[in-house]
Amino acid sequence: MSSERSATAGSPAPLCSEPAGADYRDWVRRSYLELVSSNHHSVQALSWRKLYLSRAKLKASSRTSALLSGFAMVAMVEVQLEMDYNYPKLLLIAFSACTTVLVAVHLFALLISTCILPNVEAVSNIHNLNSVNESPHERMHYYIELAWGFSTALGIILFLLEVVLLCWIKFLPIDRNWKKHKSVPAQPGEGHTGRDAALTSTIIMAPVGLIFVIFAVHFYRSLVGHKTERHNQEIEELHKLKVQLDGHDRSLQMV
């Protein structure tokens, strides 16, 4: 009689333990799937962010390169040299070299943007998470950064130098024309108006160029620091994910 009571009292125990173990296994499996899916979506989001960033860089470099190269060509064509004025030889050589390099740099950046941008645009317009792998922005990353650097950094510095040289070419002949048409004897300092104007533009443009270089370096360092922080956060998230998955594996082994 006592054995029957003990049997009836102990019989529900294994029935209750099995569902609890099964529920725990289901919970661990669901947690694992949620972690894996969230990690997959975060990787996809990072890939799409890189795609949109590459597209924005290509668009900005193409617009900037087309604009500045057009200005440089117009400046070289429209500049009117005084045929009877003896320009400094180094000034003409510097103006010609600066204009040629400026146009070549911007056209090279424009070429890269024109070739890569249509392929990136075609993928970015497809509303599919897995289509980001079809974009060539990862393989062409160095070309995109090269076009971005040529268009925004080197191209703008050359354009500032182009403005200074153009001021010297336009203002230097003024002194000779002023002396030719001036009947009254010149006062001290009146015969150097063109040179003073060109020198003023140079003095103004020198700190502007220095500020531009300092800003470019500071911006690059800030951007690199931001990317480093983001990578460290991603590494910490992956480490936490690994610790959670290792804990779930130990729990499954114990069960």
Image: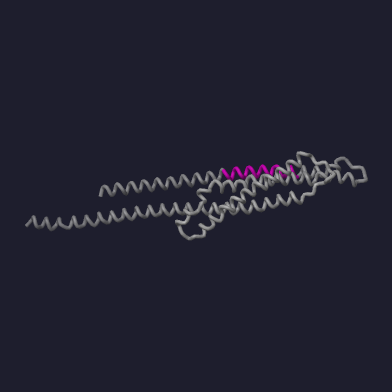
Q: Position of residue 48 (x, y in %)?
A: 49, 54
Image height check: is 130 above or below 197?
A: below
- In which quadrant of the rendered view does residue 215 lie? top right
Q: Nearer the viewer, residue 178 or 145?
A: 145
Identify the coloring: one colour
Q: Position of residue 37 (x, y in %)?
A: 39, 54
Residues in magenta?
201-220
In this rendering, position of residue 119 left or right of residue 32: right
Q: Residue at x 69, y 42 (%)?
A: 207
Residue 211 belongs to magenta span? yes
In this rendering, position of residue 24 left or right of residue 88: left
Q: Residue at x 51, y 48 (%)?
A: 139
Q: Position of residue 62 (x, y in %)?
A: 61, 53
Q: Residue at x 33, y 55 (%)?
A: 30
- In which quadrant of the rendered view does residue 204 lie? top right
In this rendering, position of residue 56 left or right of residue 165: left
Q: Nearer the viewer, residue 249 or 114?
A: 114
Q: Label the magenta part by its dominant secondary structure.
A: helix
* Furthest-left residue in this view: 1
